[in-house]
Image (cartoon, rainbow, N blue to C red):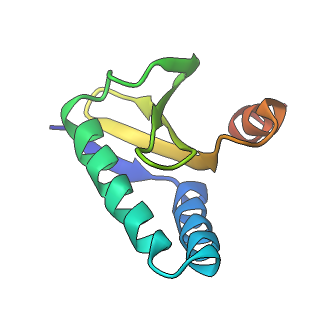
Amino acid sequence: MRELIFLLGAETDIQLAFNRLEDFQEGRGTVFMQCLDVAFSHLRRHPESGPTYQAPYRRLLVSKFPYGIFYEVQARRVVIAAIMDLRQNPNTIRYRLFGN
């Protein structure tokens, strides 16, 4: 089982998504966090399961929510780069991941 490493941007993404969903409907952020926990457990056991988004990143969808976990598989760990709402412009997602 591989270790999950969260980049600062990913941690911020989680907090912002939680707040946004709680503001929309009380309890929705908690459900989101539960779905994220399931996805993270899956990633620890099966890091190659998410399809390649654009090398070196893979993307795993979050169940019940329009969010994707963008991550990179390394030898002994999985680095979570971002957790983003997939309803935004794909160019915005690419810019966030690659900066160009």
Rendered image quadrant of residue 62: top left
Say which of 76 and 68 sits in front.
68
49 relative to 68 in the view: left or right = left
Percent x, y of residue 81: 54, 44
Of all residues, the one furthest to the front in this rendering is 25
Rendered image quadrant of residue 78: top left
Percent x, y of residue 33: 39, 64
Above or below — where is 72 with respect to 30? above
Say which of 57 and 34 sits in front.
34
Quadrant in the picture for the C terminus? top right
Quadrant in the picture for the N terminus? top left
74 relative to 9 in the view: left or right = left
83 relative to 85 in the view: left or right = left
78 relative to 83 in the view: left or right = left
Residue at the (25%, 39%) spot, across then down:
42
Percent x, y of residue 8: 56, 60
Percent x, y of residue 25: 56, 77
Of all residues, the one furthest to the left in this rendering is 1
Say which of 1 and 26 sits in front.
26
Number of marks in the rendered image: 0
Residue at the (53%, 70%) spot, across then down:
18
Residue at the (52%, 63%) spot, across then down:
14
Residue at the (58%, 70%) spot, across then down:
21
